[in-house]
Image (spheres, coloured by chain):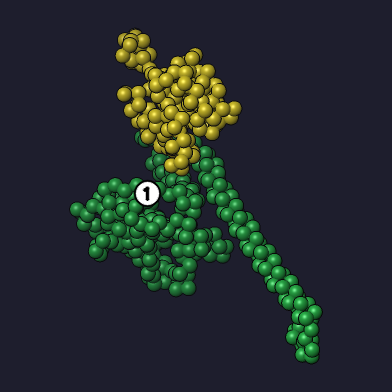
Chain colours: A green, B yellow
Amino acid sequence: MGPGRQFEGIVSVKDLILHQSREISEQLEVIQKKDQLISDVMNRNQELALASRMKTEFLTNMSHELRTPLVSIIGFTDLVRSQSEGMLPGIHLANLDRVLSSSRDLLDLINNLLDLSKVEAGRMNIEVEPVRLNELVGELTERLSVLAADRDLELRSAVPENLELMTDRVKLRQVLLNLMSNAVKFTEKGSISVEVDEDGPYVAIDVIDTGIGIRKEDLSRLLQRFEQLDTGRTKRFQGSGLGLAISRELAQLLGGDITVDSEFGQGSRFRVTVLKQLDPAAMQRPHGLSTN
Amino acid sequence: MNTPATRISQPPESRPTAATIKRRVLIVEDIKFNRELVEQILTHDFHVDMAWDGLMAVEKTDTFRPELILMDISLPRMDGLEATRRIRAKHGNSLRIVALSAHAYPHDFRLAKEAGVDDYLTKPFLPKDLLSMVKRHLSK
């Protein structure tokens, strides 16, 4: 019931004043409510900032804690492996190689966690240097060849010999390693091939596999961070989600992106696009925008 | 089987000639397995000694007089950064300090450099990488 109804008769000065003072007090109340809302939002923001900082610190600490036992796992295994050549039966040497390979996978995963916290904290530095793409791809193919041979997979790459990029070697290497090792992991038979397509200032590197492929409904979620940690999907995307999401952020830092094209049951094509000549100073860094 | 001749000829590392005396490396590490790992990697080529924490590391620079220190960063009693600062204050640049740490932020490298380390190796490392890094620094 609005106050207007009471003023249909004679409007006295007193009533007018009463009416106005009521209006003022109502407005005051609105203002107070607004202030309250604003301070609520500000408090909430502070809480969120704190939570985000705590998450980053947690990831950093976890990374340190997880790396420490890996020091002796990797170190001692490598020592035994390199000192027992010709002394242990081949099967034992091969098993030691498996331990080493798995511990390196674990280390990659931990490094990914650390990278995630770095990207989120905006602490990811870019170091540009000349990178010969065919050498980089060759090195990665070499590293994955043991794993691929285990499954009778063919590893192919077609990279122009003289293609030299100015980019961050470590990050590009990490992205390619992630895409290529995923391809090996998810392909039972057939081949993995790496192809390169130059497109103006960009270069697109395709990692194509003949693996299990990805369902349509899962495609869009694949590059979202932590999708992998979503229970129930863990089996289908075993070991790929976190690495992929980080790879995508890294590709964006390199001026590009990652896209996926897949036919369930037929195979997948992961395309990473990066700038050929990366100039970090000229880029609007995507830092901080990644927490959507 | 051993003939007198082979018994007389000693392995080169135990001959106390100036050219073959092993260089002294101090391992500063609080975790037993990691200490033993680094010891096993280096013991063939170097004369190694251990410190369990930063305070002990500072003391050992006077008693063991290492030419190179492998310094963990997270340590009980005194961390590797403070130990490095004290050792630099005491001995200047007369010895080399390599940080060996599982902290892997660029920020951590910077802090270590500011404290006075010459180099930084991230844990975990491959034994051959550690060995070649130590050799490189001691050949300078």
Residue at left offset 48%, top offset 63% = A224
User: A75 or A244: nearer the eye?
Assistant: A244
Give, as a three-letter code, the residue at label 1: Ile
Q: Position of residue B71 (x, y in %)?
A: 47, 28
Vertical comparison of A291 with B9: above or below: below
Q: Which residue occupies the foreground of this view, A171 or A49?
A: A49
Q: Quick check: can you spot residue B117? A: yes
Q: Position of residue A71 (x, y in %)?
A: 48, 37
Residue ID for mark 1: A126
Q: Position of residue B138 (x, y in %)?
A: 35, 23
Q: A270 or A14, which lies in front?
A: A14
On the question of residue A209 being in view, the answer is no
Q: Answer few, some or many: residues within 10 Å of disc 1's Cα (few below 14, many 20 plus, some between 14 and 19).
A: some
Residue occupying the point 47% across, 38% down: B108
Q: Is residue B54 left or right of residue B4?
A: right
**Horizontal and vertical percent position of residue A68:** 52, 39
Name the residue rendered at 31%, 14% in the picture. Answer: B19
* Depicted A289 relative to depicted B57: above or below: below
Q: Is residue A135 left or right of residue A231?
A: left
Q: Chain of mark 1?
A: A
Residue under the image location 54 percent in, 30 percent down: B79
Say if A159 sits above or below B80 in the image.
Answer: below
Secondary structure of the residue carrying tag 1 is loop
Q: Tell which residue pokes out farthest to the left in this image.
A: A162
